[in-house]
Image (cartoon, rainbow, N blue to C red):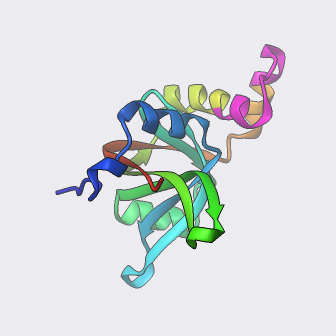
């Protein structure tokens, strides 16, 4: 059902894929949007416990598309280097396929703290509850990865 990287020598090992996901700052979430047009949107995320998590307000095009169809793909590019003399970029990339769901309440709190630490630095314990209270409007979503590949162009 899922395709592998066509040129095996360009395929990345799972350890490299995990490393790219752990250090990345943003990726692109691809969904089936209105009138079956592809809809892709950049999102900040965290790779946590083998899943990709992100947060969003609970309404809008992205939410409507995810509610209508849970199957998604998520991609990111790492270490893109322009090589003008070769008319190309050298890069490493990851693409994941899976199903998206609303995170459980337990996941939501854990992931919210991990997201905050990733993008804002460590949060003192005294400030954690205030940050969680400020984020009550946002929803946390989990991508359950069904298939993942990584590729290098160099």
Q: Give, as a single range, the part of the protein colored magenta.
A: 115-128
Q: Position of residue 6 (x, y in %)?
A: 26, 59
Q: Is residue 149 above or below residue 124?
A: below
Question: Which residue is at the far bottom?
Answer: 35
| Residue 103 located left or right of residue 125 | left
Q: Position of residue 2 (x, y in %)?
A: 22, 56
Question: Which residue is at the far front?
Answer: 85
| Residue 79 located left or right of residue 3 | right
Query: For residue 43, what is the image quadrant?
Result: bottom right
Q: Position of residue 22 (x, y in %)?
A: 55, 34
What is the chief secondary structure element of the magenta stretch?
A: helix
Residue 133 vs residue 112, the one in the foreground: 112
Q: Residue at 25% across / 53% down in the picture?
A: 4
Q: Quadrant of the N terminus?
A: bottom left
Query: For residue 120, what is the image quadrant?
Result: top right
Please say whether residue 112 is one of the residues in the magenta stretch: no
Residue 27 vs residue 63, the one in the foreground: 27
Q: Is residue 149 above or below residue 87?
A: above
Q: Is residue 99 above or below residue 13?
A: below
Q: Residue at 43% across / 66% down in the picture?
A: 31
Residue 83 vs residue 98, the one in the foreground: 83
Q: Residue at 58% across / 25% down in the picture?
A: 110
Q: Residue at 68% across / 47% down in the picture?
A: 137
Q: Position of residue 16 (x, y in %)?
A: 45, 35
Please say whether residue 117 is one of the residues in the magenta stretch: yes
């Amino acid at each position: 059902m899922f395709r592998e990287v066509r040129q095996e020598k360009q395929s990345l090992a799972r350890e490299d894929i995990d490393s790219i996901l752990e250090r990345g700052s943003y990726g692109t979430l691809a969904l089936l949007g209105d009138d079956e047009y592809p809809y892709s949107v950049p999102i900040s995320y965290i790779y946590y416990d083998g899943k990709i998590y992100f947060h969003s307000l609970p309404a809008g095009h992205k939410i409507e598309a995810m509610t209508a169809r849970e199957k998604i793909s998520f991609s990111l590019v790492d270490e893109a280097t322009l090589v003008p003399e070769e008319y190309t970029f050298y890069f490493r990339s990851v693409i994941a396929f899976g199903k998206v769901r609303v995170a459980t309440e337990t996941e939501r709190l854990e992931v919210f703290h991990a997201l905050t630490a990733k993008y804002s630095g460590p949060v003192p314990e005294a400030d954690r509850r205030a940050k969680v209270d400020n984020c009550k409007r946002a929803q946390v979503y989990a991508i359950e990865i069904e298939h993942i590949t990584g590729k290098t162009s160099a």
